[in-house]
Amino acid sequence: MESLCAQARCLAVDLHALLHAFDCIDRAGLSRHARAIERLAERLQALLRVVSMPGDPRRALLLEPLLGVHRVVEEVRSPSQVLDWAAFRRRAALAYEALAAGLRRLRVRVPSLRPRNYVRNIFHCANGLVALACVELLPGRTAMIVAAGAFLAFAWTMEIGRRASERWGRFAIAMFRPVIHPHEHTRVNSATWYVTALFLLAVFAPVASCALGVAVLGFADPAAAVVGRRFGRVRVRAGRSLEGTATFAAVGFGAAITVLSVFHPALAGARVAALAVTAALAGAIAELYSGPLDDNFTIPVAVAAATWPLLAMGG
């Protein structure tokens, strides 16, 4: 079974790379990837033959997901079929995430698929602005905690509700369909982890650290996603690119400088620069090394934790 899991993981990683390429092309651009698609189809057929054999019952966890991927690959291989490219990308992403979920149940981790989604990027920035306004403009920490607690209660109620009721789950998915990633159909979504981080920061962190965590996540993360998916060529780790990570650090630095200059003008220039550099680097590192944790949780927490000592040293 270990050998089968290793083969399935290799296939999933290659499929992840291919779907990332699909995110930037249309049907006319498929010819550049024709050989990779053929190799993937051959490996899929070989894996399906093994998974279909009687024996270890754990193979059943991979059979249906692999059949779903096979249907998607055969669809794109068909020269006579006219594809609705946007619909095909959605089906391909869901097929990949079903395979990833099957592998996770076998304790095999593969990267989550994060297809291009400009609506989500805009939504991300808007959330950052709302959270920043709450942090900087609400009158006192108690008001911050109440506001963050209300968002937290709503988010986790939605999460628990969609697992307790299939009908509620379909409603929740339909309501947020334009902004959710495929893996969020079956896992706790990023917005829930985001408001969880905001609540912790509201309770424990200094206001300036809260603001920096919110600003870096709200603006650097979507900027890195756009640049990384469109121009990323040099892979760093966890599916991230050097181009995207550099964009994250640059935009995070700019966002931190802006927030500190506008809302905390009493801080000295050198200290502002040190805080901005620390916030940008902490956020970029958290994005790269979040592992199984959602980076919408780890980034603001890491930024707040890294900048807190610098603020404390100055009183």
Image (spheres, helix red, strand yellow):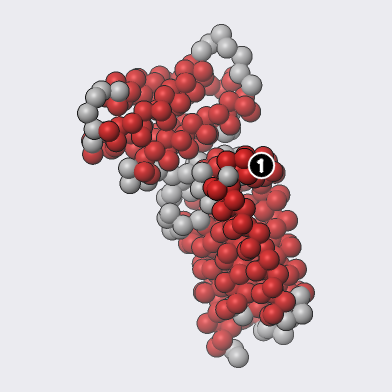
Residue 56 placement (x, y as % from top left): 24, 32
In this rendering, would 268 be left or right of 240?
right
Please count the marks in the image.
1
10 Å neighbourhood of mark 1: few (<14), some, or many (≥20)?
Answer: some
Give coordinates of residue 83: x percent, y percent. Answer: 61, 18
Which residue is outermost to the bottom?
315
Describe the element under mark 1 as helix, strand or loop.
helix
Q: Residue at x 70, y 58 (%)?
A: 127
Q: Amino acid at mark 1?
A: Phe
Relative to 135, residue 239 above or below:
above
Task: Name above or below for residue 182 compared with residue 67.
Answer: below
The quadrant holding residue 49 is top left
- Residue at (51% x, 48% y) in the render: 187
Residue drawn where x is 52% and y is 57% of the image: 295
Q: Which residue is most to the top?
A: 80
Q: Tell me, yes or no, if residue 280 can be seen here.
A: no
Q: Nearer the viewer, residue 314 or 169?
A: 169
The N terminus appears in which quarter of the rendering? Answer: top left
**Residue 246, image quadrant:** bottom right
* Residue 121 appears in view: yes
Residue 281 screen position, x and y as percent: 52, 66
Q: Which residue is identified by label 1?
A: 171
Question: Taking 133 as reference, is 290 left or right?
Answer: left
* Quadrant of image for the C terminus: bottom right
Residue at 73% x, 81% y is 140
Question: Where does the image place residue 207, in percent across and percent down from the top left?
Answer: 65, 78
**Residue 313 shown left or right of residue 266 in the figure:** left
